[in-house]
Amino acid sequence: MDITKDKLLEMYRSMQRIRQFESKIRDLATANEIPGFVHVSIGEEASAAGVCVALRKTDRITSTHRGHGHLIAKGGRLDKMMAEIYGKRGGYCKGKGGSMHIVDFSLGILGANGIVGAGLPIATGSALAAQVAGRDDVTACFFGDGASNEGTFHESLNLASVWKLPVVFVCENNGFGEFTPMRTVTSVSDIAVRAQAHAMPGVIVDGNDVLEVFKAASEAVARARAGDGPTLIECKTYRWEGHVVGEAAILGEYAYRSKQEVDSWKLKCPLLRFEKWCAENQKIDASELKRIVAETEKELDEAIAFARASELPAASEVTDDVFA
Amino acid sequence: MPQTSFIQAINQALSEEMTRDPNTFLMGEDVVLAAFGATKGLADKFGPSRVRNTPISEAGFVGAAVGAAMAVARQICEVEFASFFYCAFDQVCNQAAKLRYMSGGQASLPITFRAVYGAMGGAAAQHSETVYAQFLSVPGLKLVVPSCPSDMKGLLKSAIRDDNPVIVFEHGALGRLREEVPEGDHLVPLGKAAVKRAGDNVTVIAIGAMVPKALKVADKLGIENVSVEVIDPRTLIPLDEAALLESVEKTNRVVIADEGHLRGGAAADIAALIADKGFDFLDAPIRRVTALDVPIPFSPPLEKAAIPGEDRIEAAIRNVMGR
């Protein structure tokens, strides 16, 4: 599969935006500058970037509580995301949602979601709506290994399979559901084998290799768009940070996994790996990647300035938007 | 005008609204065969893409209705028996009810859920429960409880046109109730109570299947010159507070009749409203007539003992009238 230079640059920009954005909000949350729970996906950027580069603007996604990466990869604006995380009126949801609930319908982002497994039936319904409208838009559904133990996972895969819906189920298997190792609570070691139970292809990819993710996603998207039904892609990856920012203050450092394990995955950093591939294959000049890093730094600085300058919502806005 | 049954009224409303808006879809368990008759003929009329049988998979298809509605396809989602909502509580309460608010108004959720509730003769507790109270504390949902064919049609049509998640609770024992129902575009707005019988001495606020029971009691007591006003809120959210309070202000006495349970029920909610905003109107304590706080039992004499009948409405009226 020949990947155009534009696509390669898009993948890298996505991963840079995710890494920089989430590193920043991790620091802001640690400094108590932003309220609430913050879940970051640092180390898992390749799955979000690889899948979303395989989508087009009218395609839709559903995301999770660990969703910043998916939203950014689908084109989410850092300034409006940051303002939402600050609880500001200028945020995507006017301060009503926060880190776990960012939505941008204009970009096909049906939302992050605070309930594990909740996005699966929503994505299935989104794909159903496209199918009955006669549109060939695809919905990509991100979820974790934990969600694959929810009933909604099986109900949604069954529906999507029996109705041949244009949906791509993307399981980011990062090895942990909250603080519990996946292997201790899951009947299978590969989530992808669960696809067989619902008569759809199940594919395992190295979730830290953005190119491999992109190839698998492109095939699944093409299959969905052609009306041939859903695919389950399992991206094997790892969460460098804790389940939630600040957990070490309560649980202690390395309470449920070893430093060696975490460090071994940092060597498999998806960004470094892509940079190395670019250099070895002479696809993209290092200076171009550096330019993207610098541009993203600037975008992030502007996003923080936007968020800080945005006003907090007035108490009178509390009753807005309950009903249409 | 011809006599139309409750079930036929549902069918008319569904058919008319699906004809009116081609972007309206119906799905649920056995809607093609039409297990209860309400969706009869709709699959033939509108085709398998718009009228869709689902597996017995409530979390899956209720969640799919939420996703499809957000992707701008108006949904009518039948959850056969209202107790089955428990299998899809997340999808209704965490997703449908909240996503508009949590997205700062971006999400539109035009979904009408339909479900059969209430004791209908030996269906036992998992198919006979009155579950709307479980949704009263979930902001973002509208709750509709029709009591007669005419309201059923008009309220269901309004629910389908509404851009919010609305649950329409259809009492299983009202299915064959017949009356004249206006043909064509008969709409009953959500949030508007109906005075089903005007009276001066006591107000009975009756919900759903308790309305026909209350009307019978009112007829009976009328012979004794007790003038009973029967008022039907028709929708619990939004609630027509003004109409309920106005009636109590006129009669100074109130009985609330509901097939739901006593604790935490719709009757408790309305009683609190009247105590809060209409205390000065009252000449007697507020009385609630509800199901006993037991799961609805199977055996006919037990079921009859659990759910409120005309005798208990009459006794409550006599109590507040002091006679």
Image (cartoon, rainbow, N blue to C red):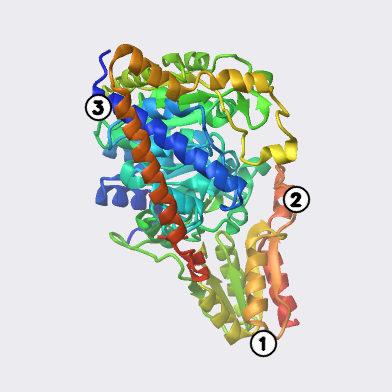
* In the depicted structure, whether residue B119 falls above or below residue A244: below
Q: Which residue is depicted at the point 60% across and 44% down?
A: B83
**Which x, y percent locates residue A217?**
36, 21
Amino acid at circle 1: Asp
- Are the residues under badges 1 and 3 in a single subunit? no
**Which x, y percent locates residue A174?**
56, 24
Frontmost residue, A148 versus A250: A250
**Which residue in the protein does label 1 denote?**
B280
Mark 1 vs mark 2, foreground winner is 1
Q: Residues within 10 Å of mark 2 (few under 14, many from 20)?
A: few
Q: What element carries label 2?
A: loop
Query: Is any atom of residue B75 visible in this view?
Result: no
**Which x, y percent locates residue A69?**
45, 35
Check the residue under mark 2 and report the chain it is in: B
Q: Which residue is depicted at the point 43% across and 48% down?
A: A81
How far separated are the C-alphas under marks 1 and 2?
A: 34 Å
Check the residue under mark 3 and report the chain it is in: A
Amino acid at circle 2: Val
Q: Residues within 10 Å of mark 1 (few under 14, many from 20)?
A: few
Check the residue under mark 1 and report the chain it is in: B
Frontmost residue, A144 versus B58: A144
**Which residue in the protein does label 3 denote?**
A6
Q: What element carries label 3?
A: helix
Q: Which residue is depicted at the point 59% across and 14% down?
A: A189
